[in-house]
Image (cartoon, coloured by chain):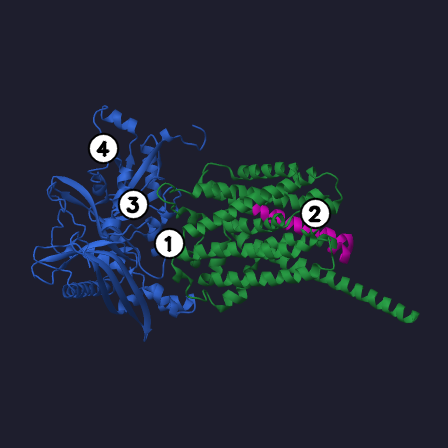
Chain colours: A blue, B green
């Protein structure tokens, strides 16, 4: 080996790093290291491809950089984090504060700012141990696919190290991260514990039941400064994305206006929120005007959802359903979490001329005193069914 | 010699390379931490002032066709002032160049070569610049023109690629750290245009002297535009820069760029382009210092001067012993040194020269008139 130059065989590629509270030290760090195909064949005797594509090494230490050094001394290879996709913090550690670790990670040239930040409801080590995909063998690929699922569901948002660090040092809002857990899966019930009809209940839950364990990213973990203060469920995350104008699409169940015991499914394909903030007597007054574009997915034998009257009824139900959830989200984040994850601060800052006056106002602490006015206008544009359209 | 003459684009890009080298390192970050969220207004303001400043310089240069600042120094203060001006230019340029190349080498070490010896890296840069200069001035200029063009494209790519992640509300509070910081003390950020130093030297090298005004306007406009793009992309992308956090700011924005799924780690490409940019910067500085020293000391061959200037740059790069010292030199010493040399000393020389020349011309006109009157 030439001085300072490592060949690919001398490097151990980390694909995910887990952070837990240590038993004897401050920190327990788990490194999920990808095994090269040759090494994998040796370990499995060249048999099937069902063997694990990665190994997990855990070290107890007082800081991240010391942890890396300890692992380097233990492994025969040099740890390389340029392909790391996930940084997982346990809920317990996140509640104590993760600011110092985020700053250390941001300063590490090898750790990419595009790494995803996830808060695990179980220990980070347990999360990594169960992060084997049912359909993908390569761990790094699996992790990148796992975060891309948010584009199809809107049940979570892919938060990167850069996003989290920026939010942490921002005066416009508070940081948040992906919420994840290990969930029991049965092949005949992939919904795991999220089997409620009302999707407001959907959240990352822990369960030991089921024949197969799988990681589940659902919802968001909310921080005040660098400490975890609460979590948002799947539907609250959809609301959050709508109000933040980062919503892509989602399928939502709302109570049927025609039958109390039924639900109808709506595919929301566009949502925009016009937000504004006024400062009234020193208190923030936040207005959100939400516009939803949607299509109907549900159909039943005797229902004709596309008459003008029924369409209007569905729109009214949707408006009141979302209005209730938006109000719930706004008051939950302001009164319960006291964390402006929606970053309304960026609308409030226009009322201030200098950074000094803005900093003196202390938006992040004033947000808890906010009062809100939300309106929702939905537009059911098509049945999205083969049989009938508008 | 006609082979050393520059066309408008070559001359414009010679001026721009200085601003670009500073933009790549820490210039936008320094502006952001000094004025906060009003950085965009500040850049527009100092660009306007620089533009006005150049129009005055252009006017002051008008009675001196084909002359540079050294010739004007000689005109007003004889050989002594010419030597003083030359020494001031040589020392300030070698010092700032040495510090800048050291800072860039430290950045490369941090990112890619953790075990490398920094003076060795600086030495390799200087060796390359010496070889390029030995080949000839015109080659330095042509290579610089090509590289500046590529670097300008990378700055535009960074701005466009970070477009989807920006928060436009980060321009608020509109007055940033205050009206005073933006418009009064913020005026000192005009040092960002220290590349103007070439406009005091470049006049005798232009193919067509009438293009001098064009070169000045084009170089200030392009420098302003790229400074604005860099400052805007950082301001709208990273909230922590306005609080004075020291970072490799432009490099950080390249790390946040994702060009589809295939090009995820494009920062290596930017670093490669920047290495060429710094080589061009170093070559241009050495070639101009060689040119003026050759002229002042009446030396026949360029080689000894090239070696001496390269050695002086290496020595300058060995002065700081820590990154804090580098940052201090860049943020304060370089700032005030550039302001003094470009905006105070050279301007005063030019102003005195102009007044002397116009007085002399007026006296000559008066004496001619009086002779004519006497004859009549």
User: Which region is colored magenta?
Assistant: B72-99
Q: Chain of mark 4?
A: A
Q: Is residue B84 magenta?
A: yes
Disc 4 on helix, strand or loop? loop
Q: Residue extending furthest right?
A: B375
Residue A90 in view, yes or no: no
Q: Which residue is mark 2?
A: B292
> Counting other residues with Cα less than 10 Å from the Cα at mark 2, is it few (<14), some (14-19), or many (20 or more)?
some
Q: Which residue is mark 3?
A: A87
Disc 1 on helix, strand or loop? helix
Q: CA distance from mark 4 to mark 3?
A: 20 Å
Q: Nearer the viewer, mark 2 or mark 3?
A: 2
Q: Position of residue A52 (x, y in %)?
A: 23, 33
**Location of residue B92 with respect to A65 vertically, above or below:** below
Disc 2 on helix, strand or loop? helix
Residue B161 in view, yes or no: yes
> In the rendered view of the protein, which quadrant contains the C terminus of chain A?
bottom left
Q: CA distance from mark 2 to mark 4?
A: 68 Å
Q: Chain of mark 3?
A: A
Q: Which residue is mark 1?
A: B165
Specify whether disc 4 shares its chain with disc 1.
no
Q: Which mark is residue B218?
A: none
Task: Report which quarter residue A353 is drawn in.
Answer: bottom left
Q: Nearer the viewer, mark 4 or mark 3?
A: 4
Q: Which residue is mark 4?
A: A52
């Amino acid at each position: 080996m030439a001085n300072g130059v490592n060949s690919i065989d001398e490097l151990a590629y980390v694909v995910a790093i887990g952070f837990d509270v240590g038993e004897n030290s401050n920190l327990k760090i788990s490194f999920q290291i990808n095994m090269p195909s040759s090494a994998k064949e040796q370990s499995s005797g060249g048999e099937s491809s069902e063997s694990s594509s990665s190994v997990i090494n855990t070290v107890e230490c007082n800081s991240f950089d010391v942890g890396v050094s300890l692992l380097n001394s233990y492994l025969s290879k040099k740890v390389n984090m340029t392909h790391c996709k996930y940084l997982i913090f346990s809920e317990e550690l996140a509640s104590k504060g993760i600011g110092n670790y985020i700053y250390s990670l941001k300063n590490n040239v090898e750790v990419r700012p595009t790494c995803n930040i996830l808060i695990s409801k179980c220990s980070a080590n347990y999360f990594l141990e169960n992060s084997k995909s049912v359909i993908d063998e390569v761990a790094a690929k699996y992790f990148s696919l796992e975060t891309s699922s948010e584009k199809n569901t809107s049940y979570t948002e892919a938060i990167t190290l850069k996003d989290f660090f920026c939010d942490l040092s921002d005066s416009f809002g508070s940081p948040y991260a992906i919420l994840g857990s290990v969930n029991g899966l049965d092949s005949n019930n992939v919904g795991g514990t999220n089997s409620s009809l009302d999707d407001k209940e959907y959240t990352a839950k822990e369960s030991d039941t089921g024949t197969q364990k799988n990681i589940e990213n659902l919802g968001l973990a909310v921080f005040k400064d660098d400490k975890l203060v609460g979590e948002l469920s799947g539907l609250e995350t959809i609301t959050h994305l709508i109000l933040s104008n980062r919503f892509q699409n989602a399928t939502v169940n709302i109570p049927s206006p025609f039958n109390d015991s039924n639900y109808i499914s709506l595919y929301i394909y566009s949502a925009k929120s016009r937000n504004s903030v006024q400062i009234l007597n020193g208190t923030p007054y936040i207005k959100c005007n939400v516009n939803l574009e949607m299509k109907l997915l549900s159909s039943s034998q005797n229902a004709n959802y596309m008459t003008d009257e029924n369409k209007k009824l569905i729109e009214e139900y949707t408006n009141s359903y979302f209005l209730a959830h938006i109000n719930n989200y706004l008051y939950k984040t302001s009164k319960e979490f006291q964390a402006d994850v929606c970053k309304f601060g960026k609308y409030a800052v226009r009322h201030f001329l200098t950074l000094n006056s803005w900093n003196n106002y202390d938006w992040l602490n004033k947000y808890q005193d906010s009062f809100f006015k939300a309106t929702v206008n939905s537009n059911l544009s098509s049945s999205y069914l083969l049989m009938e359209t508008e | 010699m006609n082979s050393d003459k520059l066309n408008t684009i070559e001359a414009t890009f010679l001026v721009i390379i200085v601003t670009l080298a500073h933009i790549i390192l820490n210039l936008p970050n320094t502006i952001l931490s000094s004025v906060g969220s009003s950085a965009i207004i500040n850049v527009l303001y100092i660009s306007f002032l620089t533009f006005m400043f150049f129009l005055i310089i252009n006017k002051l240069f008008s009675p001196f066709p084909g002359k540079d600042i050294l010739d004007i120094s000689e005109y007003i203060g004889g050989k002594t002032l010419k030597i003083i001006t030359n020494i001031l230019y040589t020392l300030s340029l070698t010092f700032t160049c040495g510090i800048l190349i050291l800072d860039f080498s430290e950045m490369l070490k941090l990112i890619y070569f953790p075990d490398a010896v920094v003076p060795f890296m600086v030495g390799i840069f200087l060796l390359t610049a010496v070889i390029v200069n030995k080949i000839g001035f015109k080659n330095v200029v042509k290579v610089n023109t090509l590289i500046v063009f590529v670097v300008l494209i990378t700055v535009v790519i960074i701005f466009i690629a970070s477009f989807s992640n920006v928060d436009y509300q980060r321009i608020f509070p509109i007055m940033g750290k205050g009206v005073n910081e933006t418009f009064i003390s913020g005026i000192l950020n005009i040092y960002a245009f220290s590349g103007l130093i070439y406009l005091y030297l470049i006049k005798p090298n232009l193919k067509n002297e009438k293009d001098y005004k064009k070169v000045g306007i084009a170089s200030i406009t392009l420098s302003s535009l790229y400074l604005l793009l860099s400052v805007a992309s950082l301001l709208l992308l990273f909230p922590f820069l306005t609080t004075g956090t020291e970072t490799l700011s432009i490099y950080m924005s390249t790390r946040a760029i994702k060009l589809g799924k295939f090009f995820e780690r494009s920062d290596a490409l930017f670093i490669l382009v920047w290495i060429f940019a710094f080589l061009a910067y170093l070559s241009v500085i050495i070639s101009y210092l060689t040119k003026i020293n050759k002229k002042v000391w009446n030396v026949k061959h360029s080689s000894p001067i090239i070696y001496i200037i390269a050695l002086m740059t290496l020595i300058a790069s060995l002065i700081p012993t820590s990154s804090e010292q580098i940052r201090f030199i860049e943020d304060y010493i370089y700032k005030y040194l550039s302001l003094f040399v470009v905006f105070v000393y050279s301007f005063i020389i030019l102003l005195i020269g102009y007044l002397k020349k116009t007085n002399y011309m007026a006296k000559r006109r008066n004496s001619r008139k009086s002779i004519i009157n006497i004859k009549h």
